[in-house]
């Protein structure tokens, strides 16, 4: 097996279901700071997954947005007000270092349904392929750019900007018809996006994710999610592109339904001990799908030697490394990432050295 592949090429080969001289190792751009240790890891083969350069832009020409800074208990927060011809809604967000805390989503009362419906129907999408290509060229071969469709239509009402999860659950019982009207409008919007992504320069794109089986359940997943994965996949596959979803929760309940989708890869799949499926179980139920993992977050807290051994043992659960990518999609304690990521890479290298027959 040639060893001259770039980090991006290793990832792309595994994304297509193959393998190279080692299991690729990736991390989200937001989970690792730019510094000397990060550069050493990139030189060693780490590939950064950059999600900041999508292949389309979204506009709402008939919605006006304005922001003001409010102070709550001495903390600065950003209030964003969205004004439409049928009313206004607002959000309240608190900056929190590398992330942010939502204090208010758009939806407050049933009167807001008409505003949200207007905003959804007002969205216009435009390709931005040249910007994507320029970013890909500028960022180089140790970074891979990921496109995205946005959240699944129903998931957009659960973990998007419109409602929070608890509110969704209440309104699903009290105002389901209104929610389903929003859902239907989101479905039509997503169908406009599918060809924009499929015809773009991006090799792969994520379709939503962060599905919580304990909230959604199997019946609703099969009814409101599976069909949209398959519709998008049909368009993507016509153009030779790959589609996956960020499924990082307890996937056992949904595993057979996921197996029946046309998704090419399961991204952010997090093996036990952090979820209810091992890597071996995932491969058994998804034999034809690429597994793009999230390394279990709890294991980062173990010693470097134990992190390395866990990596070796986890990859060792599989009979083939075809279609396997090791990744990090969640935050790592700031005093651990340098050591844990290095230990993971050591484990991947050791597995390749001790199982050369898998890397031919």
Image (cartoon, rainbow, N blue to C red):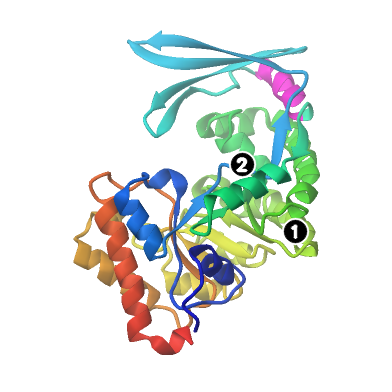
- Residue drawn at x 41%, y 24% is 95
- Residue drawn at x 53%, y 30% is 164
Instruction: Please say whether residue 148 is visible from this viewpoint.
Output: no
Q: Position of residue 181 (x, y in %)?
A: 76, 32
- Residue drawn at x 40%, y 9% is 71
150 versus 1 height, above or below: above
Q: Nearer the viewer, mark 2 or mark 1?
A: 1
- The residue to which callout 1 is attached is 236
- Residue drawn at x 70%, y 36% is 57
Q: Secondary structure at mark 2?
A: helix
Q: Position of residue 171 (x, y in %)?
A: 61, 29
169 versus 25 height, above or below: above
Q: Position of residue 264 (x, y in %)?
A: 64, 65
Relative depth, front residue between 7 and 266: 7
Horizontal side of 80 relative to 179 (left or right) equals left
Q: Magenta region, mostly helix, strand or loop? A: helix
Q: Position of residue 131 (x, y in %)?
A: 67, 42
279 versus 203 height, above or below: below
Q: Which mark is residue 31?
A: none
Relative depth, front residue between 6 and 263: 6
Q: Looking at the image, is mark 2 or mark 1 earlier in the sequence? A: 2
Relative depth, front residue between 180 and 275: 275
Relative depth, front residue between 123 and 213: 123
Instruction: Please say whether residue 300 is visible from this viewpoint.
Output: yes
Horizontal side of 118 relative to 300 (left or right) equals right
Q: Residue furthest bottom?
A: 357
- The residue to which callout 2 is attached is 155
* Range of residues picked out in magenta: 110-120
Disc 2 from disc 1: Cα separation: 21 Å
Label 1 crowd (10 A; few <14 / some 14-19 / many >=20): many
Horizontal side of 184 relative to 135 (left or right) equals right
């Amino acid at each position: 097996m040639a060893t001259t592949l770039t980090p991006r090429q290793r990832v792309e080969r595994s994304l297509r279901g193959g393998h190279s001289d080692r299991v690729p190792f990736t991390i989200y751009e937001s989970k690792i700071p730019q510094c000397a240790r990060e550069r050493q890891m990139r030189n060693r083969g780490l590939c950064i997954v950059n999600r900041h350069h999508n292949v389309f832009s979204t506009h709402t020409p008939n919605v006006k947005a304005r922001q003001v800074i409010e102070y709550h208990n001495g903390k600065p927060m950003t209030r964003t007000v969205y004004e439409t011809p049928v009313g206004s809604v607002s959000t309240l967000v608190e900056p929190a270092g590398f992330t942010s805390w939502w204090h208010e989503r758009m939806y407050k009362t049933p009167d807001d349904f008409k505003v949200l419906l207007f905003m959804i129907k007002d969205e216009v999408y435009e390709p931005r392929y040249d910007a994507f290509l320029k970013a890909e060229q500028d960022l180089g071969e140790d970074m891979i750019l990921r496109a995205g469709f946005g959240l699944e239509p129903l998931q957009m009402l659960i973990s998007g900007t419109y409602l929070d999860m608890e509110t969704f659950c209440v309104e699903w019982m009290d105002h389901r018809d209104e929610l389903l009207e929003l859902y239907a409008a989101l479905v039509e919007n997503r169908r406009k996006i599918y060809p924009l992504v499929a015809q773009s320069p991006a090799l792969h794109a994520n379709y939503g994710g962060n599905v919580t089986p304990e909230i959604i359940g199997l019946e609703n997943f099969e009814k409101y999610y599976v069909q949209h994965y398959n519709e998008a996949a049909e368009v993507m596959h016509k153009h030779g592109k790959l589609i996956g979803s960020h499924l990082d929760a307890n996937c056992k309940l949904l595993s057979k339904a996921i197996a029946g989708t046309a998704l090419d890869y399961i991204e952010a799949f997090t093996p036990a001990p952090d979820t209810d499926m091992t890597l071996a179980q995932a491969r058994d139920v998804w034999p034809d799908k690429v597994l793009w993992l999230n390394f279990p977050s709890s294991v980062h807290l173990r010693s470097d030697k134990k992190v390395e051994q866990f990596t070796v043992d986890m990859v060792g659960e599989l009979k083939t490394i075809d279609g396997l990518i090791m990744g990090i999609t969640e935050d790592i304690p700031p005093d651990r990432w340098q050591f844990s990521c290095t230990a993971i890479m050591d484990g991947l290298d050791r597995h390749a050295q001790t199982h050369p027959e898998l890397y031919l």
